[in-house]
Image (cartoon, rainbow, N blue to C red):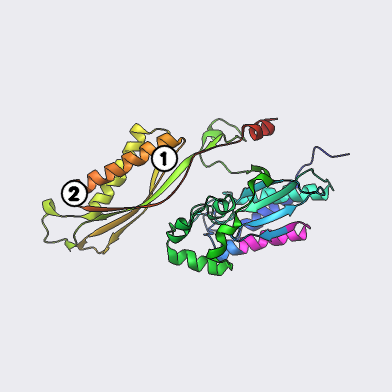
Amino acid sequence: MVNNNIQIDEERFRKEFDLLSQIGATDEGGVHRPTFSNAHLEARSWIRDKALDAGLGFKVDQAGNHSLILPCSYHDRPSLIIGSHLDSVPNGGRFDGALGVFAGLEVLRRIKEEGINLPINLEVIDFTDEEGSLVSFLGSYALTGKLTDKELENPRGGRTALVDGLERAGLKESKILNAKRDLQKIAGYLELHVEQSSKLEKANKDVGLVSSIAGIVFYNITFLGKEDHAATAPMDSRRDAGIGASAFSLAARQMVIEQFPTCYVNIGNMRYEPGSFNIIPGKAKLSLEFRAPKAKVMDKLDEELLERAKQIAAQYGLGIEIDFLGERQPALMSVGMQEIIEK
């Protein structure tokens, strides 16, 4: 008789997750595991060893996605994928991504320990570079066939970082797109993820169901001015690229707050050249990322932000270069899967 009330081994889960969290640990209690860093590769090896110790299958595809597998005994059955990631943003939270991978491992271990033969295969995937330090959603987009050659040729993290990272991980760039899977053989996708907002906490709820995922767009924008001496160039005639970049940063924030209340914008990196105390910046380069729940809203915000950047450049007598890095369209979650989870 099948046990329909399987519980995880909570003591084991807590103990081992704490051990995983020590890999790349920071003094603040988080983790620092950028994609293909030593800490990231060590965490992946640690999870692999735990899976093999439990008698689970293990494989790596050509995009570097790591899969832990509990096959069923039935021929040609689809796989239910449980996924997340072990890479982190710089100085990230220890539950972000890692919780989903480790929870998936524990689920597979417990089902195997109970000797249950499910009618489908179970597969836990640790996706490569889900945080996008090199290429946004490299592993998951390669698996689903959405990754493009252009994104590999012009990665958001730069060519050098991508090439060096792939070499450290033993991967070949020319093979990455071969990781595409037949989606007809995937029964569904589940991911346990820590809340990154505060809505559940404020509502005193332990668990929430995600109904949609916002779309996201990435740009590099460069304002071009004229280098000059800070002690002699008249204030009212300076072509200061830094002023243009700063003005756009403030304008983008205000635009989203006032006109696009369901959206988010972030300028996470800004660099001035030559970057000297006494030289007016001749170049200011920033990274722009914005998110929207619906495609039409995302397109409108895209148009408005770029137009505002051009207006600000003209206002301060600057040139402007806009480099599109990629986008991810909004996605609705499966209603059927949501209903099953609610039950």
Residue at image point 85% right, 39% down: 2
Q: Nearer the viewer, residue 96 or 115?
A: 115
The kind of residue on which mark 1 rests is Tyr
Q: Residue at x 67, y 55 (%)?
A: 67
Quadrant occupied by the C terminus: top right
Q: Position of residue 272 (x, y in %)?
A: 28, 59
Looking at the rendering, the stretch of residues picked out in magenta corresponds to 42-57
Q: Is residue 335 left or right of residue 324?
A: right
Residue 264, numbered circle: 1
Decide whether residue 53 is among the magenta residues.
yes
- The residues tagged by marks 2 and 1 sit, at their Cα atoms, a distance apart of 26 Å
Q: Which residue is mark 2?
A: 316
Q: Is residue 19 visible?
A: yes
Question: Where does residue 144 sit, x and y in percent of width and height?
Answer: 58, 49
Q: In this image, 188 relative to 74: left or right?
A: left
Crowding near pointer 2: few (<14 within 10 Å), some, many (20+)? some
Please tell me whether mark 2 sits on a helix, a strand or a loop: loop
- Residue at image coords 20%, 55%: 240
| Main SS, magenta residues | helix
Image marks 2 and 1: residues in contact by CB distance under 8 Å: no
Spot occupied by residue 147 in the image (x, y as percentages of width and height) = 52, 53
Q: Quadrant of the N terminus?
A: top right
**Residue nearest the viewer, comparing 21 with 305:** 305
Residue at the location (59% across, 68% down)? 170
Q: Earlier in the sequence, mark 2 or mark 1?
A: 1
x and y, in percent, of residue 331 in the image: 53, 38
